[in-house]
Image: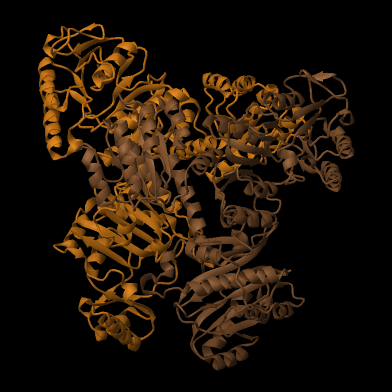
Chain colours: A orange, B brown
């Protein structure tokens, strides 16, 4: 066996420890499924109290089984599982599947028992799925292994599925069967003590029988490995995931911009986006997307032609397309002329193409290839409402012929259930996914288009940057909390992040002297290790014109702090030259437990908090990730010379993002970093971090 | 008959003009449906070429029918329909249903023929549905009228449905039957030459057999009547609508903030929101919501308890609840104690309550009333995944008993199809809606919660305001285009909208003199009838400190315009005192073809364009609508004293919104109005429109 997971998914011999004669128990149902669904190897029931189980000769214990066992399925009560593991090790079993619950999910005692079992399994070179799971199956007819207690045996196909919830797994198998989606392998990973979702993504990435990988996730054991694995596998094989389970805001106080924005859900979203994984909100949408990916090519763009025999569904589909980022473009003159040749005058040859209720199967068959051939079309959604006198099945067959051999995806929606089931099965044979309503088709296609864009974008690379980590570490020294201005400056300088010249002044006179040296006008800002939102306390005074005004500004800031009883927190002021007007942006970083550094970019100033126009990525960022962040800001207009303002230096912004990412990767002591605002004044002019703060451990 | 629509929906005698012997034609199918589905009156086939149709004695024309005809169903070719209408008038028919297509939807010629028929129908005091429709039905067993050519006869219930698309209507009837949703009446309104959706909403509003009104809309014939009718009916009877068909940006250039934001889709969304109509994105969601409303009470709040026998679905449901505005709160100590009494130690008695896979039907029956009794819970979603050994049907029956008599809504999701159909039918009898996935239940509940909030909010009223429309009209005079500053000031003053004192100055010296009079510092702003975005051309200079600086500002603005060749467009400058710092907001108004005035409110300044944090309502606004606009801004923090800034005077903002609404209602000449920014500096301190512009016809 080439891969250690083969012993789990392609065993030749399976022992069921705890196989039961009493149908309706888990130990009976899992044994029944192994026997009933055509397993091509041999199954051995192990049950000390029975001479046979469901008609098969039983064995009192594992030692009594006459052959070497590849896979042991364990369904005995939790208290007996550790002893069974010992038996498995002794018998040289290659892999175990522990269905039984009552381990890590119940608390520390259970976790200790699970860890002890895992240690034995690993020492013996075995693999383990579970505990606390529904089981696994391999629907490949060459294996036909159903080691689950689910009542459903799905049709075989090219979709692989891993579920972190057994209950959701049950629903998934039923739903896949109902939709006619072929499953290659399914694994309920339970507590994932040994085999994880990441293991399976890698395994399925290498299996030519798998075309699509589906995941139901509740948590990430190793986010960094998830990112790296998916980024690689998703280049050639789409991965679609539902991730549920938000962990709440966590214990950290929302003490900064980045911190308050970057809940773990933000990290999850960033991770999934970077990984190239298609995320859906629901299981239904997961399968809606899987139906496209398992059967149709990934489109090269977002331009959709709609073909219908009724106006309403066409409008619904067009609306859904446009509200999910797809375009319903005008068709080429050649296409409209060719359609006009055979469609009645009442038909609309604009997009949506409405062939009206009298449309025959032949019209569908003729129109579909014309739309597919239009160079301005990347995908086609075919809609059909069965009017009186037209057979859905005939239309389905016509679509099948008309779409045969297409290199662009074709999706269909046969609205109204009447007569559709027969048509659907014909469409399935032709591998054209069909949806009960046009919107579902549009939404699924939109998600696949986004994946196509990720593929086209290329993988990007983590760039080489000239930085001086040693200098930054020296500047941090044994500081803790918010770094003082000079240390902050030194750290940023070591990472090549430009800042205006800044002088710390601890008295009004010193501030005036510093301003004289810098040149007027200047910005006077509170320096404090404890007060982080300077503006809120009146601690920022801009455009200060002369020495007298500088002294006044120093006094004003002190007076404002005194008025709120915080004068003692004033370490002085910083004096900076005024930076000419530019676009104010935000680059920030924080650490999310389990996910490592999280890098944010968005519109700076108060917009960060008011409109949260900020995107996130997890470390390490590629240049493509940095570009996505800059291009992903909603207020793009602000970067493009908004109302006479400067155009942003996008390259310099991307560079600053990557430098912050590198800084967070290098300097584990840095807990949090905000550059707000970081200003850009024009292409080629670079960026300058006007205000910066860094918190260290 | 009490209501003119009764002759359409409760006829005693129906003639089918064009009834056909050839099954598979529309004329045959509609006649077949009338006969086959148990119509309690009499049906007369009219067909000059047949002595009988489908076994029923036929008549050569309407005159030959021996009884008075309430409803004539017309399925003859389009060219013959006008003559048939004449026959109907002559025969004293009370109502006609024109199935035949080929009228207004085909162009001007068809519209002329349709208009002529409508005139005859109206003159005769008849009502008319269609032309170009699927037909109508009344599933009430006392009538059992199926005057459609749809193959589906839905179960009877308390839901009424109007569809503007026949094709969508076909799908709707099928889907309703599949879900077991009882339909009371259904009308495909086609071209709605006479009977409109609004007529039906009124009719169903008065019908005690109707509990929920569903609409599939593609356009509004009379938005103002839709608004008024729905606002009244929705107080006692929920209305749920899918509105599709965006009409594109339209021909108007996006010449202003309001104009560029206020596409007709914005007007549609505003209208539906104000009307108290629950809008869904898809037909599936329409029915998901209808299942709640047809069977369960409207909840009084958004706090949801989740009851499950598996963790995964509970997490999925909690996620869906929270991302759709519902809260999954902690349960009271009494509830958790009562649950703990009978649930196993591994169960979680936090919300979601996870009774784990061993949960029996009895556990569901005992837990559900406890959750319903918790004073911190407004609704319950019950989740069930059939594990081995537990019967879904038994759990369904237990839920039915446990939820009997509840005054809070109970929704269910039985995940996995296996064994669910039987359980579902039991739940339906108990009137507990059930969904295939938990998210659908959460989303449907969230929409119903929002409707409940609309009900609780009260209708509000259009307030009496002291305004001087005559003075405003005089100020507008025969201006056209953008009003000059003095006229703008006069119009706003007449409507009680405060502005800073503003002086127009046409020279640098005049500006300096005006500034001397006003007091320093001042704001100097370009005055121009043609340049609307003053900031973009450098036409706004703030904080001008003395007379010399005022002269310089005048010269600077002139020079900037000269540099772009637009000096001729400078009418001078306005001189205003600087207004102290406050929160900058936006009130705007425009007119959308067909919808009348559209009033917008949001965060002012450039945020209007960059983040579009602006809401809209259509004229006339009630005080409740104005409050909703103020409360609906996303950046609420800015109104609540953001980072030490002032708290907004919400009452004054609402008043300003209502005054602008009244202005737009009174002054038809005003095409567009922007107050940006309108500034608020504290509760009780009112608002002041710093910059204003008005465009007149």
Please indicate, yes or no, whether residue B627 appears anywhere in the rendered image. yes
Q: Is residue A281 visible?
A: no
Between B558 and A557, the one lying in front of the other is A557
- Quadrant hosting residue A222: top left
Tell me if A97 is positioned left or right of B136 in this view. Answer: left
Q: Which residue lies at the image location 42% right of the left edge and 52% below the top edge?
A: B325
Which of A202 and B166 lies nearest the eye of the viewer? B166
Residue B614 position in % (x across, y down): 53, 62
Q: Position of residue A304 (x, y in %)?
A: 59, 37
Residue A462 screen position, x and y as percent: 32, 45
Towards the viewer: B69 or B202: B69
On the image, the x and y values in percent for residue B605 come to 51, 69
| Residue at (43% x, 45% y) in the render | B409
Quadrant where the N terminus of chain A is found in the figure: top left
* Quarter of image, res A126: top left
How many marks overall?
A: 0
Rendered view: B688 above or below B198: below
Q: Residue at x 36, y 46 (%)?
A: B372
- Of residues B518 and B593, the one nearer the viewer is B593
User: Does A49 sit above or below residue A650?
Assistant: above
The quarter of the rendered structure image containing the C terminus of chain A is bottom left
């Amino acid at each position: 066996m080439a891969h250690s997971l083969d012993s789990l998914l392609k065993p030749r011999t399976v022992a069921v420890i705890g196989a039961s004669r009493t149908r309706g128990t888990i130990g009976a149902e899992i044994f029944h499924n192994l026997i009933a669904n055509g397993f091509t190897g041999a199954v051995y029931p192990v049950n000390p109290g029975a001479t046979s189980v469901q008609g098969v000769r039983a064995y009192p214990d594992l030692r009594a089984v006459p052959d070497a066992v590849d896979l042991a399925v364990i369904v005995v009560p939790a208290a007996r599982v550790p002893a069974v593991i010992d038996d498995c090790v002794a018998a040289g079993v290659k892999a175990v599947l522990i269905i039984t619950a009552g381990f890590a999910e119940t608390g520390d005692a259970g976790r200790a028992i699970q860890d002890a079992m895992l240690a034995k399994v690993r020492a013996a070179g075995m693999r383990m799925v579970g505990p606390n799971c529904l089981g696994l199956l391999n629907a490949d007819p060459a294996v036909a292994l159903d080691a689950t207690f689910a009542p459903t045996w799905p049709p075989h196909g090219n979709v692989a599925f891993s579920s972190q919830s057994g209950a959701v797994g049950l629903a998934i198998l039923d739903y896949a069967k109902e939709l006619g989606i072929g499953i290659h392998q399914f694994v309920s990973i339970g507590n994932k003590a040994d085999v994880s979702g990441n293991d399976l993504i890698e395994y399925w990435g290498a299996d030519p029988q798998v075309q699509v990988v589906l995941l139901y996730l509740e948590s990430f054991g190793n986010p960094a490995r998830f990112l790296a694995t998916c980024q690689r596998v998703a280049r050639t094989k789409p991965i679609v995931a539902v991730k549920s389970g938000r962990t709440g805001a966590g214990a950290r106080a929302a003490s900064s911009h980045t911190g308050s924005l970057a809940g773990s859900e933000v990290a999850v979203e960033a991770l999934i986006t970077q990984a190239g994984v298609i995320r859906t909100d629901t299981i239904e949408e997961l399968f809606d997307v899987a139906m496209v990916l398992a059967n149709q090519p990934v489109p090269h763009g977002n331009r959709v032609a709609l073909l219908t025999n009724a106006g309403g569904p066409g409008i619904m589909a067009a609306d859904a397309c446009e509200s999910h980022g797809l375009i319903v473009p005008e068709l080429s003159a050649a296409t409209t002329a060719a359609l006009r040749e055979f469609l009645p005058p009442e038909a609309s040859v604009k997009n949506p193409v409405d062939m009206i209720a009298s449309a025959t199967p032949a019209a569908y068959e003729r129109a579909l290839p014309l739309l597919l051939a239009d160079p301005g079309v990347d995908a086609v959604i075919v809609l059909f409402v069965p009017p009186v006198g037209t057979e859905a099945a005939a239309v389905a067959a016509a679509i099948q012929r008309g779409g045969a051999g297409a290199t662009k995806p074709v999706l269909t929606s046969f609205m109204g259930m009447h007569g559709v089931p027969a048509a659907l099965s014909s469409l399935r044979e032709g591998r054209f996914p069909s949806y009960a309503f046009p919107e579902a088709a549009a939404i699924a296609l939109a998600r696949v288009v986004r994946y196509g864009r990720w593929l086209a974008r290329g993988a990007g690379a983590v760039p080489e940057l000239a930085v001086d980590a040693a200098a930054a570490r020296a500047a941090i020294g044994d500081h803790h909390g918010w770094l003082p201005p000079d240390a902050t400056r030194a750290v940023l300088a070591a990472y090549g992040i430009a800042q205006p010249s800044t002088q710390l002044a601890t008295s009004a006179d010193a501030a005036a002297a510093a301003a004289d040296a810098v040149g007027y006008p200047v910005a006077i800002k509170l320096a404090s290790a404890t007060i982080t939102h300077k503006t809120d306390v009146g601690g920022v005074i801009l455009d200060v014109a002369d020495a007298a005004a500088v002294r006044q500004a120093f006094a004003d800031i002190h007076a404002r702090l005194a008025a709120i009883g915080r004068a003692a927190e004033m370490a002085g002021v910083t004096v900076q030259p005024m930076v000419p007007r530019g676009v104010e942006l935000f680059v920030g970083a924080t650490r999310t437990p389990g996910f490592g550094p999280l890098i944010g970019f968005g519109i700076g100033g108060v917009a960060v908090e008011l409109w949260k126009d900020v995107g996130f990525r997890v470390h390490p960022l590629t240049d493509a990730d940095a570009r996505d962040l800059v291009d992903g800001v909603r207020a793009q207009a602000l970067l493009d010379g908004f109302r006479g303002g400067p155009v942003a230096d996008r390259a310099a912004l991307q560079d600053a993002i990557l430098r912050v990412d590198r800084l967070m990767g290098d300097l584990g002591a840095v807990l949090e970093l905000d550059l707000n605002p970081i200003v850009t004044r024009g292409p080629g002019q670079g960026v300058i971090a006007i205000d910066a703060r860094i918190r260290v451990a």
